[in-house]
Image (cartoon, helix red, strand yellow):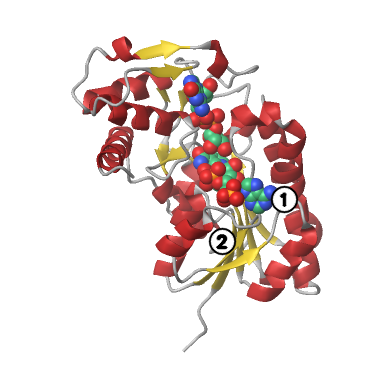
Amino acid sequence: MPAAPVALITGITGQDGLYLAELLLGKGYEVHGVIRGQNNPKRDLVSRLLPDVTLHHGDLTDMSSLIRALRESDPDEVYNLGAVSFVAYSWEQAALTTDVTAKGVLNMLEALRLHTGDDPGRVRFYQASSSEMFGQVQESPQHERTLLWPRSPYGVAKVFGHHMTINYRESYGLHASSGILFNHESPRRGPEFVTRKISRAVARIHLGLQSELVLGNLDAERDWGFAGDYVEAMWLMLQQPTGDDFVVATGETRSVRDFVRAAFAHVGVDDWQRHVRQDERFMRPAEVDRLVGDASKAREVLGWKPRVGFDELVRLMVEADVEATRSGW
Ligand code: NDP
Ligand code: GDR
């Protein structure tokens, strides 16, 4: 019997890391994850949800820890999902964002190049690129060749990581792919991101525990999909004969206002405006107004398409938060 393929995931404690690890375990992979910090509070969550995953201490800003994680796990595939990923926060800590989200990619690529030596293609690499790279969009929908004009320190950092991944593919023959993923959400989404902030608040308002939801720009439009669908695209990219870049998106865009309206409607509240207030605090120094992706290449080459649509996504997030709030989780 052939040995199980081995995957190493950075960012395993995040939304995508958890879904990807579940997907790979289900496919018979041996899964390893890089976990940062001393006594990381999310270690228990990973161990509870994914007892079969082996964790290695490491940090994207510390290249020797990445080399060690590679040596210890000896993976066939590396998924680089670790990042400072909250756009709003990236203005407050632009240098840290650059160290982790930009230079961290170089550290990982360089660690991989040293690890693979004479046979650079033997380990396949996935970089978590982002629609945030499009920023001030010049054409719609956005595809793999759309001009990049990032509007946040996070977006700038992701552009660096994206181009560095392409550069390592072209310079050293690494099997490196960059997934340009549009926003994807789930009940595991961090509560700082707008969809989860909304679904949690709607659940609490529905249960009488909160009266108000305070937001920033309600006009921003995003192409929102379900994280469980998107990690499948990551895996599919690494099953191709060569590395490449792919947009992963639903092709539909909705405003933050649409999300709020749909979430309240799900708990039977039509006059949602009564509960929502806007505050400057949540406005960004530079906004990305409207994103919508053209995933035809992913559809044609990878055979990928999203399964969960917008209404279903809102439903499953609100229901999960109502349930979690009720049970005091
Ligand atoms: P999360 O914010 O949920 O997870 C981020 C992960 O990065 C966490 O596991 C975090 O670990 C880890 N991390 C942070 N700093 C470091 C560091 N210095 N060294 C190693 N790991 C670190 O993000 P998502 O799961 O939503 O996203 C996964 C990736 O995809 C990210 O790179 C994100 O930028 C990108 N992306 C996400 C999209 C989305 O809509 N979700 C869309 C496009 C791209 P810890 O728990 O220790 O903080
Ligand atoms: P985004 O996601 O910046 O697109 O980055 P986020 O959910 O934070 O914001 C989406 C839009 O909602 C507007 N908004 C608010 N956002 C937050 N967080 N809180 C609010 O109160 C609020 N009010 C309005 C924002 O201005 C924005 O326009 C996510 C991250 O996962 C990135 O890591 C990833 O790369 C991109 O998606 C694609």
Near mark 2 (Cα within 10 A), the count class, few <14, some 14-19 or many ≥20, is: many
Does residue 197 appear left or right of residue 141 in this picture?
Answer: left
The image quarter containing residue 93 is: top right
Helix or strand or loop: what does disc 1 sit on?
helix
Q: Name the residue under label 1.
A: 105
Q: Tags 2 and 1 in contact by the CB under 8 Å rule?
A: no
**Could you tell me which quadrant the C terminus lies in?**
top left
* Circle nearer the N terminus (2, 1): 1
Along the line of sight, the residue nearer the viewer: 7 or 290: 7
Identity, as a three-letter code, of the amino acid under mark 1: Val
Residue at the limit of the structure toward the left, as seen here: 268
Task: Confirm if mark 1 falls within 8 A of ligand 1.
Answer: no
How far from the left and from the top, in percent, is residue 6? 56, 73
Question: What residue lies at 47% left-to-right and 53% top-to-bottom?
Answer: 231
Q: Mark 2 points at which residue?
A: 238
How far across and down, in percent of the image, does residue 152 sit?
67, 27
- Occupied quadrant, residue 258: top left
Q: Is mark 2 on a helix, strand or loop?
A: helix
What distance separates the C-alpha of mark 2 from that of mark 1?
A: 17 Å
Residue closest to the far bottom: 1
Query: Which residue occupies 39% across, 42% down?
Result: 186
Q: Does the image show residue 247? A: no
